[in-house]
Image (spheres, rainbow, N blue to C red):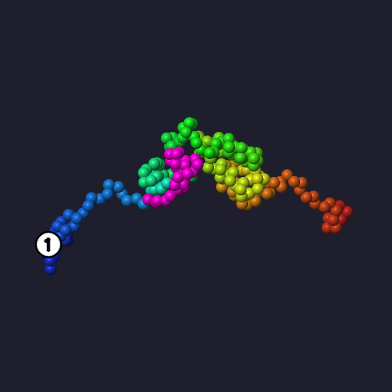
């Protein structure tokens, strides 16, 4: 079919392709096209940015806004149009940290420290302190827990300290160590029930016209 001569024009489909189309063709890309989502993100105090998963960037960029390019397999982070970090994309909650992004001991200029976080937690309550200690001890590096600890402690601006401490008591007892668990307890008022659990339950009356004793049965 391609080689069959045209009836009203000279040549064939094949000859026209060779003379017109082929010279204008460019090589196909070496890589298959892949969609990339682009968004901006702020580098958190723990030098990680969030795109579903948490990914580290160099620690000196804490507080800066960066550009995140997310493909199906790769997360690339840019600052002032320069690549500063690249990670295999993870499609699950968690944290990916490159050791080179972490500050060395003599470079730590962050305003927060484990001691400061625990002091704030202690001011709220012992249960809050226990929850924060678990977070700090459960991470390979304490800085990785700063984000969730600050998220918890900042709830004290929204809820009374007693409620936050009761919510942490429930979470500690049930081994719930995600911030969304604490928020769920507070939003559903489970902490209020916990606070009243130790109060003396109201006693039912033992004498009432509707209560019958053994004399009523023969």
Mark 1 secondary-structure assignment: loop
* Residue 109 point in image, percent of width and height: 50, 36
Image x and y of residue 214, in percent: 86, 52
Nearest to the observer: residue 99 or residue 95: 99
Q: Residue at x 65, y 39 (%)?
A: 126
**What's the residue at 61%, 50% (across, down)?**
158
Residue furthest toward the right? 215
Q: Is residue 106 left or right of residue 122?
A: left
Magenta region: 36-65
Image quarter where the C terminus lies is bottom right
Give left or right: position of 151 versus 8: right
Q: Is residue 188 visible?
A: yes
Residue 8 locus on image (x, y percent): 12, 68
Q: Name the residue located 85 percent from the left edge and 58 percent from the top edge.
A: 209
- Of all residues shown, which one is farthest toward the top? 106
Residue drawn at x 56%, y 36% as measured from the top left: 114
Residue to which mark 1 is pinned: 11
């Amino acid at each position: 079919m391609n080689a069959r001569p045209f009836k009203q024009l000279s040549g064939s489909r094949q000859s026209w392709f060779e003379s017109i189309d082929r010279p204008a063709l460019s090589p196909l890309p070496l890589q298959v096209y892949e969609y990339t989502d682009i968004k901006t993100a702020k580098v958190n105090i723990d030098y990680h940015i969030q795109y579903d998963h948490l990914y580290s960037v160099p620690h000196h960029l804490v507080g800066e806004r960066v550009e995140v390019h997310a493909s199906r397999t790769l997360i690339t982070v840019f600052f002032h149009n320069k690549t500063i970090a690249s990670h295999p994309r993870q499609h699950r909650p968690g944290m990916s940290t490159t050791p080179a992004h972490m500050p060395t001991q003599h470079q730590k200029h962050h305003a927060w420290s484990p001691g400061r976080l625990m002091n704030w937690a202690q001011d709220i309550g012992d249960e809050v302190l226990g929850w924060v200690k678990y977070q700090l001890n459960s991470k390979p590096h304490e800085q990785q827990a700063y984000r969730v600890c600050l998220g918890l402690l900042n709830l004290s601006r929204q809820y009374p300290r007693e409620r936050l401490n009761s919510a942490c008591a429930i979470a500690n007892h049930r081994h719930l160590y995600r911030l969304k668990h604490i928020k769920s307890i507070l939003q559903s008022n489970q902490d209020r029930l916990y606070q009243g659990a130790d109060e003396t339950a109201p006693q039912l009356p033992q004498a009432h016209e509707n209560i019958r004793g053994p004399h009523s049965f023969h």
